[in-house]
Image (cartoon, rainbow, N blue to C red):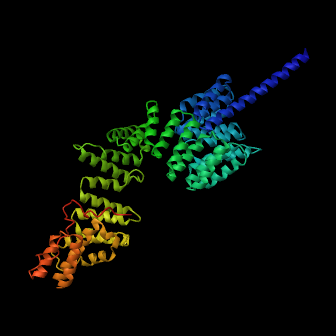
Amino acid sequence: MNKILKSLSVSAVAVLALSFQTMAQTVQDGLKNLDAERYNAAGTIFKQLVATAPVAENYFYQGYYYLNLQDGQMDLAQAKESFAKGAALDAKRPDPLNRVGLATIKLLSGDKAGAKADFDLIKKDTKNKNADVMFRIGEAYALSEKINDPAEAVLNIQAGLDLLKVKNNPDYYIGIANAYLLKNDGGPAMTALENALSMGQKTAKIRTLMGKVWYQGKNYPRAQTEFAEAIKADADYAPAYYYLSNLFTTFGKYEFAAKNAKLYLEKSEATDASKLKYVKLAVAIKDYDGAMTVLNQIFDALKDPIKYRLKGYIQVEKSECAEAVKNIQEFLNKAEKDRHLASDYGMLGRAYACIKDEAGKKMNDSLGIANMERAIELGDTLTITMNDIANIYKTSKNWTKLATSFEKIIASSKRPTAADYYNLADAYMKSKDYIKADTALSKTIELYKDTWLIPYIIKARAKQYANPADTTFMAAPLYEKYLLLVPEAEKAKDNTKRYLAEAYGYLGMKALLINKDTVKATEYMNQVLKYDPTNTKAQQVLQSITGGTPPPTGTTPPPNNNQPNGSGGAGGQGQPRN
């Protein structure tokens, strides 16, 4: 009988030991899925654990799961319920980790003082000797991007680490790294991750975090290497694909970015949260059709008002402008103000500006410009620029406002380009501010360094329009420089022929009226007819020379190709080059 009981006892111990071993492994499976952003799988595991073994440890990890949902979408109510159940299992000596969980809820609810008091009491009750308690308290201070205290996080996790006789748990170092990353302090974060990596556990997670550090530090080759190593360690680790997609987006390699975005969605489970994250990636890589398709699948189920922002942004890019205005406005109305971005106003401005409604165009342009200017004031450099505002003024032919826009572009630029100054000059010409145009064209010519010659022609015209009574032919040096520099091969082009005729005609009149050089004047007028055979002015001048009749009346004739009537500032000279 004793032998039978002894045998049964041994068997029971073996079964019990096996059950604990299986349970521990199951908890680790849940945590592994949580790390890999397979939230449904993780949630199922922790739910089953609590159902089959409602012990303090399982309640703690279920609560922990609710605090670590995707993109900070933690469920404080569900987490609190789990921690409360875990703590209530022993009324006399509530489980310390579940107590830490309840204090964490206070912290993340904004009661920092109350949470600190609870944390201190738990540490006192455990005599400051429970490493897990110290670690989880420290981790609590680094869970949220909005409510955190990296210094407290590092202090408590390090205290827990110091209590470990064998420092073989990488989570402690990962926790320290996450705390430093909240401060954007990459050096100490990388040191902590290197310590974690040396333990040979959670390699994919650690390599991904290392890649994230290098990515934030703009060391893109090292970041790519780490993400590749993470995937090599665990091909199913979804976050590595997510960050790799971001990396390729930074390079403009949208094909590779799209491939990794889809792999992220595949590896992470197609939850609404994962799909939302995918939509953000798809928008970044300009896959607007793909982004809209997935967004429509989850739109009604999403509670986060970001869905309106994303839909509005996509609609702007797809020229669905009136609907874009409604959705971006909806986001601004429903989202907390601290979530508003400068780009929201930039995209809203673009949306107003592209609405195809002739009756309401003036109002929509005004609203578009107002929102664009607000975006720029708030620091938007991605979705909107002063050039977008300038384009609205250009389309509406508001030349004075257009000039003001280009003035702002130049004033705000560290290194204004020759094209910037040319566009400013062109706006001045069209608004008939020829003196300012002349000045802007001087800078244009300086910056182009004779690689583009049209500014010489336009500057010559500006001088003539600014000084209609000029009898000194002050624009002559500009035309002479143009003729000196124009390549032989260019002279066969229609636009160039017009400029050549204009230059020779002006210089011919100077030779005749100022220098009294009929030979030179004849030579120049023949050149005019070479490039513009029907030029009546040149024909009249030649007749006056050969027939002894007075030359045509006037001093400096206005350029044939650019009357300052607002219809064109440069007379078909082509676009400025950067």
Q: Percent position (x, y) of residue 90? A: 68, 26
Q: Residue 105 placed where, x, y %? A: 56, 35
Q: Residue at x 46, y 32 (%)?
A: 297
Determine whether, in the image, residue 462 is placed left or right of residue 163. Answer: left
Report the label total: 0
Q: Is residue 110 above or below residue 219?
A: above
Task: For the N terminus, give its image quadrant.
Answer: top right
- Where is residue 304? Give x, y as percent: 45, 35
Which residue occupies the foreground of this view, 457 or 544?
544
185 vs 481, nearest the viewer? 481
Q: Is residue 265 above or below residue 522?
A: above
Coordinates of residue 77 in the picture (x, y in percent)? 54, 30
Residue at the spot x=37%, y=70% of the render?
451
Image quarter (top left, top right, bottom left or bottom right) of the C terminus = bottom left
Task: Please state which of residues 158 and 49 is positioned toward the viewer in this rendering.
Answer: 49
Locate residue 300 relative to residue 480 in the image: left or right: right
On the question of residue 287 being in view, the answer is: yes
Which residue is nearer to you in this view: 539 or 399? 539
- Is 577 left, or right, of 569 in this rendering? right
Can residue 506 be spotted in the picture? Answer: no
Please tell me in which quadrant of the rendered image residue 455 appears. Answer: bottom left
Q: Name which quarter of the figure residue 204 lies in.
A: top right
